[in-house]
Image: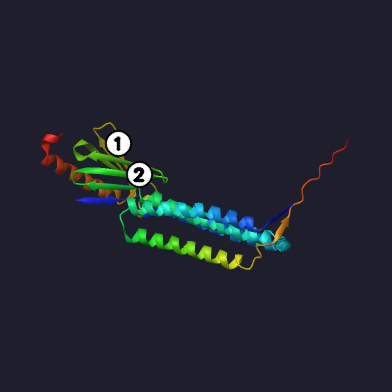
Amino acid sequence: MVKILRSHAIISLKFILVTLVLAAVPVVFYYLITSIQPDVLEINFVYPLLVLGGSIYYVFAILFFFNSFVDYYLDVWIVTNKRIIYIEQTGLFARTISELRLSRVQDVASEVKGFMQTLLGFGNIYVQTAGKEQRFNFFQVPDANHVARIILETVDRYKHENPDEQ
Amino acid sequence: MTISLTIFLYVYFAVLAVFLLFFLFIFSHLLKYSFLSFTTFFISFIVLAMLTIVLFETYTFASVIDWNATIDIPLPEFKTTL
């Protein structure tokens, strides 16, 4: 069994909205300039600077969107019938992979708290471990209660099949 | 002192080259570490499409500009009296 989990897609709405706001800023700026001081565009270097500056700004906004998507998409929890793996991408140049054997799992708790979480059915899962890292956490995953139950059942089955590994 | 508008064009291309390098890096990250799925393909396509539109529109607006024109930058006069 392999179950791949990511944070709920609604989390990606944050950086999508920021990108849309970033995209709207030059348009508003242009309309402000043309309505308050339209003569300024007649100056010989202003229009070229606006064109190049606007281009660089939009390329930066696209880069921000792409980077944010990769940061969101590469944060992954993988639940198998032997272990739980958490891959966390922090920015572009930092990547952490944590692994937890199912034999080390002591307790699993799920939490769905708040209006949006309850409406859309996503929440946090806390896995209590016997290892050095006491808690292995899943954040804002879809259907948290159901996933927590699957993890518990998988842990119980693993411990039943491997009683010597505890 | 007079400077040509071409200087701004060179600066623009230099900054664009740096950004495009970042794009390549992010894209290779996605290919290396991600599970290839419809989502990654769709987002990559959207990003490439937006980038193409921005660069094409930049070319459209920039092609009507006379880049050989110069700007006069008045320098302050330093008066020396003996």
Decide which of B43, A116 is in the foreground and name it.
B43
Q: Amino acid at mark 1?
A: Arg
**Does A132 sit above or below residue A36?**
above
x 18%, y 37%: residue: A103
Image disc number at residue A135:
1
Q: Which tag, 2 or 1, sits closer to the chain's start?
A: 2
The colour mode here is rainbow
Image disc number at residue A88:
2
Q: Is residue A80 left or right of residue A137?
A: left
Q: Residue furthest right?
A: B82
Q: Residues within 10 Å of mark 2 (few under 14, many from 20)?
A: some
Residue A66 drawn at (x, y percent): 44, 54
Give SS at disc 1: strand
Q: Are marks 2 and 1 on the same chain?
A: yes
Give SS at disc 2: strand
Q: Quadrant of residue A26?
A: bottom right
Q: Chain of mark 1?
A: A
Q: Residues within 10 Å of mark 1 (few under 14, many from 20)?
A: some
x 52%, y 57%: residue: A59
Decide which of A155, A3 is in the foreground and name it.
A3
Decide which of A13, A58 is in the foreground and name it.
A58
